[in-house]
Image (cartoon, rainbow, N blue to C red):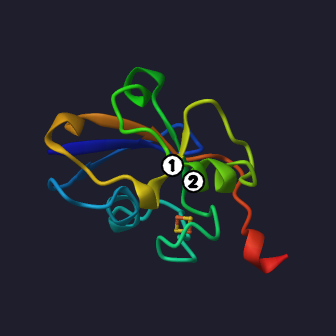
Amino acid sequence: MKVTFITAQGDKVEASAAVGDCLLDVAQNVDMPLEGTCEGQMACSTCHVIIAPDWFGKLPRASEDEEDMLDLAAGVTRTSRLSCQITLTEDMDGLEVRIPGESRDMQRR
Ligand code: FES
């Protein structure tokens, strides 16, 4: 299956992925600038991505903890998610994800 990332500069980068992969790992494999500092502990928000609006409703909803963390992320939109919380399923083949322009590591302030 494939996931397409759109960089902050607007370039499209295709990544191949497998069911069960974590979206953050897939992004890092193709050098997207997501730090993922807390390694999926929902404590950093540096893995913030923006899901294409067509896709957002097809993903499982964010947990409350994830939403709380997203409130702290820079440049959050209505279709923002933490990529470390998204596990790829078969239905997500072709998923489109945008990398936010501005990222800020909350743990480093
Ligand atoms: Fe820290 Fe996702 S890696 S919240």
Q: How crowded is mark 2: few (under 14 residues within 10 Å), some or many (20 or more)?
A: some
Q: Is mark 1 on a helix, strand or loop?
A: loop
**Along the line of sight, the residue nearer the viewer: 70 or 96:** 70
- Coordinates of residue 18 in the picture (x, y in percent): 15, 56
Q: How crowded is mark 1: few (under 14 residues within 10 Å), some or many (20 or more)?
A: few
Amino acid at dot 1: Ser
Pointers 2 and 1 in contact (CB under 8 A)?
yes
| Residue occupying the point 20% across, 44% down | 2
Q: Residue 66 carries which label?
A: 2
Q: Tell me if residue 107 comes above or below residue 19 in the rendering.
A: below
| Residue occupying the point 44% across, 61% down | 84
Q: Which mark is residue 63?
A: 1
The verdict on label 1 being within 8 Å of ligand 1 is: no
Quadrant location, the N terminus: top left
User: Within the displayed image, which quadrant is ligand 1 positioned in?
Assistant: bottom right
**Along the line of sight, the residue nearer the viewer: 67 or 18:** 67
Q: Quadrant location of residue 69?
A: bottom right
| Residue occupying the point 18% across, 34% down | 91
